[in-house]
Amino acid sequence: YDFESSDDSKVGAFSIKASYGGYGGINLKNSKGGVDASNLVSVRFWVKGDAAFNGPGNPTLQLRVNAQEYDFEISNGVWSIFQIPLSNFGSPSTIEALVLQNRQAGDLLVYVDQIELLAAEETEEPTSQPSSSPVTPSPTISKAPSQHPVTPDPTSDPTPSPSSGPSLGPSRETSPGPITTDHPSLSPVKESTPPPSDPSADCVLVCSTPPPTFPLETPSPTPAPAVTSSGTFTIYDETIALGWSDYSSSGTYDASSTMEAHSGSKSYKADIAGWGQINLKAASPGALLSELGSDASATNVSLRFWVKGSGSNIVLRVRVNGKMHDTTVSPSGSWTQVSLPLTLFYSPANVFQVEIQNRASSSLSLYFDEVELHKNLFF
């Protein structure tokens, strides 16, 4: 990792160049008690994947604030800005660490610039300006969802690829900008002070010229299969739901296996390598809980699925929209149902991504069937 790379930058002359190994990560820590987050509402940063090194497709990164996780996709060859509410990480009162992790098993080359924590009320001027950059006003974010990357910077690439990052709802601030010196717990970055070169050392978050204003684009909802009369949204049963795609990694996966089935004639066969995962995803908003019934909410809707394999005490990490919960299963050669209330995943109002990860370094062979969101009839 190079914290003073001049190979590519969005603002000023330097950026963080992250030459990730498989599942590697940038780890920015504050060992002096953390940053007071009582008046902070979101994290904002620029990211660009190296198209020549990474090849086709949109790599997935994971942002961790303290220990809470959020996955998102980036674009290769073009700078994209992300703004993610701290409510996605449980609204922490103190921020001790930020981690940007490669979610692929293979190597990845990424550039990161202008990492900021935003407060509910900000001034129009950044904390410090690079001497070579003109001062521009802080962007005004519309009330469209802001967690996905905005329209890529047209000056970076004549043919930028569209971003597919999810949108989870509007930001809580109306005029975000960089942290000001009104926050005593955060010190401004002076132009003469370079970022630290060791990602495990204390790191002051980069404050620089705010990015230019871009119109936010809300992706069109993807058609979803009809909800059954029992209040069930099927993500997988015989086949993956309409509008959902399979991004599973580190393993061999067959969504039409006829070797086993809990119902019907097919199931999802997963030969998962160590730390590999099933990843089923739709364009936001995905499945709305309101479609399960007028009284449906995270308090009475569960993610449930059937699993079959050999062995016992198998630990699986289940993520819904990037929020995780570990569960232990013991299928032992028979079909076992797992049911997880959505309250375990920060009570989402919609579901656009479901991941099931092998939490061991050894490989794992399992069958899955009837992956669905189900409204409990008696709660």
Image (spheres, rainbow, N blue to C red):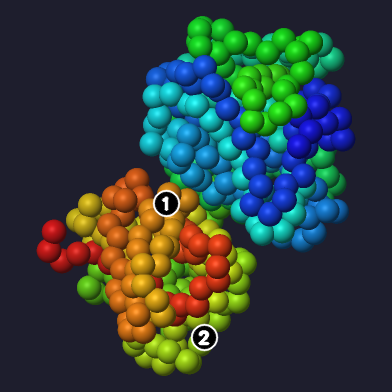
The x and y percentages for residue 31 are 54, 21
Give the image location of residue 235, x and y in percent.
Answer: 42, 71
Q: Which residue is mark 1?
A: 324
- In this rendering, is residue 264 above or below 123? below
Q: Residue 256: give its label.
A: 2
Q: Is residue 171 visible?
A: no
Q: How many marks?
A: 2
| Image quarter in which the C terminus is found | bottom left
Q: Give the SS element for disc 1.
A: strand
**Residue 46 in picture, x, y percent from top left:** 68, 35
Residue 328, above or below 66: below
Query: Which residue corresponds to the image point at 19% horizontal and 64% vertical from the top-left?
Result: 376
In-image side of 152 versus 326 (left or right): right
Q: Residue furthest left?
A: 378
Mark 1 neighbour density, 10 Å: few (under 14) some (14–19) many (20 or more)? many
Give the Cα distance between marks 1 and 2.
27 Å
Which structural element holds mark 2? Answer: strand
219 or 301, which lies in front? 301
Quadrant of the image occupied by residue 250? bottom right
Q: Which residue is depicted at the point 80% across and 27% down? A: 4
Could you tell me the amino acid type at mark 2? Ser
Label 2 Cα crowd, 10 Å radius (few <14 / some 14-19 / many 20+): some
The N terminus sits in image quarter: top right
Residue at image position (22%, 73%) is 230
Q: Is residue 131 left or right of residue 112?
A: right
Residue at 86% over, 30% down: 6
Q: Quick one: 66 or 129, which is closer to the camera?
A: 66
Whether residue 195 is situated above or below residue 361 in the rendered picture: above
Residue 377 position in % (x across, y down): 15, 66
Q: Is residue 207 visible?
A: yes
Residue type of the residue flagged with mark 1: Met
The answer to whether the residues at label 1 and label 2 have Cβ atoms under 8 Å apart is: no
